[in-house]
Image: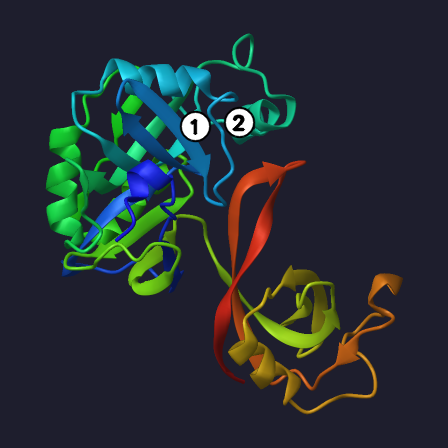
């Protein structure tokens, strides 16, 4: 079996989908910070940082690597976390983006830190086959916190209250992990779910625009009090084939259903009879004062 520490071959696990806030005793809940996902290889007097795609971030976040090295013991670890830049105590997505874009290490951008939330490897063996609760105990024992290294807070059972707490701090959401869930490297699993602290809304699906790389932009509408359908812009569906198959099978329309003509950017749209509804959330970071829309799935026929 390959040694993921020696080979630098670890890959992050991802949530299988989104969920409305819930309470369950068989889940633990931890905050999301809207940072740069990072796997940190710590040991043998060295630290190597990889992003979610395996690209080396060590030179860009040398301050994070130094903080992890300062807190390291004699054991090897592979840690999963988010790198943030938070000069005022609140993660600043724009400063993080500037660091990644300009490869700025210090200066007015502020010092970066890593918030670790899981562990994949400890004491010369992978621990991915152990449950999330056991890995959490290993993580807390393995990490020595300092100004640049923080272990994410975790609570059990009370997901709704935790989402409210995260919302009050201005953080984007919460990750829910089943207590007995294994760490499935490079996979998505419904053993992990994301709960946004941002409000979500329901929209009618009025058509779609095919895009590159199997992506689709859904054209959204909202029914007014007088029954008219108002144009509400777009959301990217992504490569969700099951949902796209349902949408594409919906009855086609010869023209748009809106009370007023939509922008010309929709001229090549495939129009639909608006009998499908989807949920749309709002993610950070904000861009020019607006939050990015995030497709969260079909809800029902209307």
How many residues crowd around disc 2 within 10 Å: few (fewer than 14), some, or many (20 or more)? Answer: many
Q: Are marks 1 and 2 in contact (CB under 8 Å)?
A: yes
Front residue (pair 158, 85): 85
Dot 1 corresponds to which residue?
84
The disc, 1 or 2, on the residue closer to the chain's N-terminal end is 1
Q: Position of residue 117 (x, y in %)?
A: 27, 39
299 to 92, vertically: above or below: below
10 to 14, vertically: above or below: above
How many residues crowd around disc 1 within 10 Å: few (fewer than 14), some, or many (20 or more)? Answer: many
- Residue at the image point whose x is 46% and y is 24% from the top: 58
Rounded to the nearest angstrom, the CA distance separating label 1 from label 2 is: 6 Å
Can residue 88 be spotted in the picture? no
SS assignment at label 2: helix
Residue 96 circle label: 2
Q: Is residue 278 left or right of residue 258?
A: left
Q: Is residue 88 left or right of residue 145?
A: right
Q: Is residue 264 left or right of residue 62?
A: right
């Amino acid at each position: 079996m390959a040694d993921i520490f020696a080979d630098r071959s670890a890959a992050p696990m991802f949530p299988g989908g989104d969920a409305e806030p819930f309470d369950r005793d068989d889940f633990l809940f931890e905050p999301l910070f809207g940072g740069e996902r990072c796997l940190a290889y710590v040991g043998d007097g060295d630290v190597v940082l990889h992003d979610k795609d395996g690209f080396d971030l060590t030179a860009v976040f040398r301050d994070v690597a130094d903080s992890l090295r300062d807190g390291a013991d004699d054991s090897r670890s592979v840690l999963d976390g988010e790198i943030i830049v938070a000069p005022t105590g609140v993660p600043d997505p724009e400063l993080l983006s500037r660091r990644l874009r300009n490869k700025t290490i210090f200066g007015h951008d502020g010092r970066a830190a890593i918030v670790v939330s899981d562990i994949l490897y400890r004491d010369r063996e992978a621990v991915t086959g152990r449950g999330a609760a056991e890995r959490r105990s290993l993580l807390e024992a393995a990490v020595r916190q300092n100004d640049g290294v923080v272990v994410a807070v975790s609570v059990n059972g009370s997901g709704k209250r935790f989402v409210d707490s995260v919302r009050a701090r201005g953080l984007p959401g919460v990750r829910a992990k089943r207590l007995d869930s294994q760490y499935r490297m490079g996979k998505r699993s419904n053993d992990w779910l994301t709960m946004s602290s941002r409000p979500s809304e329901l929209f009618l699906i009025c058509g779609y625009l095919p895009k590159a790389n199997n992506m689709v932009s859904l054209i959204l509408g909202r029914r007014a009090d007088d029954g008219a359908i108002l144009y509400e812009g777009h959301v990217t569906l992504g490569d969700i084939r099951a949902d796209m198959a349902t949408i594409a099978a919906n009855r086609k329309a010869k023209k748009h259903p809106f009370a007023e003509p939509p922008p010309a950017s929709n001229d090549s749209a495939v129009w639909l009879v608006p009998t499908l509804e989807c949920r749309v959330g709002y993610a950070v970071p904000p861009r020019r004062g607006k939050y990015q829309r995030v497709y969260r799935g079909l809800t029902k026929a209307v």
